[in-house]
Image: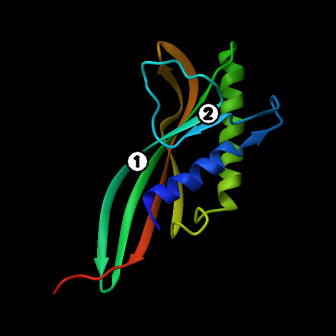
Amino acid sequence: MSLRTALDRLVVLQEAVAISSPISTTVRKAYKYVPNQAEALSQTPLFFNSWTFAEERRAVSLAERMYSVRMQLAVEDGDMDRAADIATALFEQFLADLRLDVTLNGNVTRADVRGNSPTLVGLTYGGQTYVGIDMNLDFAIVEGATYAP
């Protein structure tokens, strides 16, 4: 198990998010890492991710690494209220989809989602503003470990 493998699975889940209301759409792209902020986002809705290492807890023959992945979802629509409604629907569907794979295909031991404050936000990339969702996925990766005496 590794952070990169967990992120690979997270991106697969994000790219599979689809809704039928208020419009029929799917997430068109999920970036494993943050795209270039100087450029406009080419296709929305899309997710992008960044991560923070929180700590490593060590016990006899065991290492538990704690991470927090900041997930941002960007939606573009000429009507900002409709974009917010689309983003909210995609957010709710993502939560439902994550419940079906809470271990990210066996790569993490738990996964807790929390919204940032505020969670529904404006995101600016390449001078263009998008409606977005800003949330975190906190998880642990547990592996066997050998330590020197």
- Horizontal relation, residue 86 to residue 9: left or right: right
* 73 relative position to 69: left or right: right
Is residue 88 positioned above or below 75 on the image?
below
Tell me the crowding category of disc 1: few under 14, some 14 to 19, or many 20 or more residues within 10 angstroms, Cα based: some
- Image position of 97 with respect to 59: above or below: above
> Where, quadrant-wise, is the C terminus in this rendering?
bottom left
Q: At x 61% / y 65%, what residue is drawn?
A: 105
- Where residue 143 appears, as percent x and y from the top left, is 41, 75
State the image coordinates of residue 74 (x, y, percent, origin top left): 58, 29
Name the amino acid, label 2.
Leu
Marks 1 and 2 in Cβ contact (< 8 Å): no
Is the image coloured rainbow, by chain, by secondary structure, or in one colour?
Answer: rainbow
- Which residue bears the numbered disc 1? 51
Q: How far across and down, in percent of the image, does residue 50 sit?
A: 43, 42
Q: Quadrant of residue 9?
A: bottom right
Q: Residues within 10 Å of mark 2 (few under 14, many from 20)?
A: many
Q: Tell which circle, 1 or 2, labels the residue nearer the N-terminal end.
A: 2
Which residue is rendered at x = 30% and y = 86% of the image? 60
Q: CA distance from mark 1 to mark 2?
A: 17 Å
What residue is drawn where x is 43% and y is 73%?
Answer: 142
Give the x, y percent position of residue 64. 37, 71
**Up-down: is 118 above or below 56?**
above
Q: Amino acid at mark 1?
A: Trp
Which quadrant of the figure has residue 82?
A: top right
Farthest left residue? 149
Give the vertical position of 108 relative to 83 (above or below).
below
Dot 2: element: strand
Name the residue that disc number 2 marks. Answer: 46
Under circle 1, the secondary element is strand
Q: Is residue 42 left or right of residue 1?
A: right
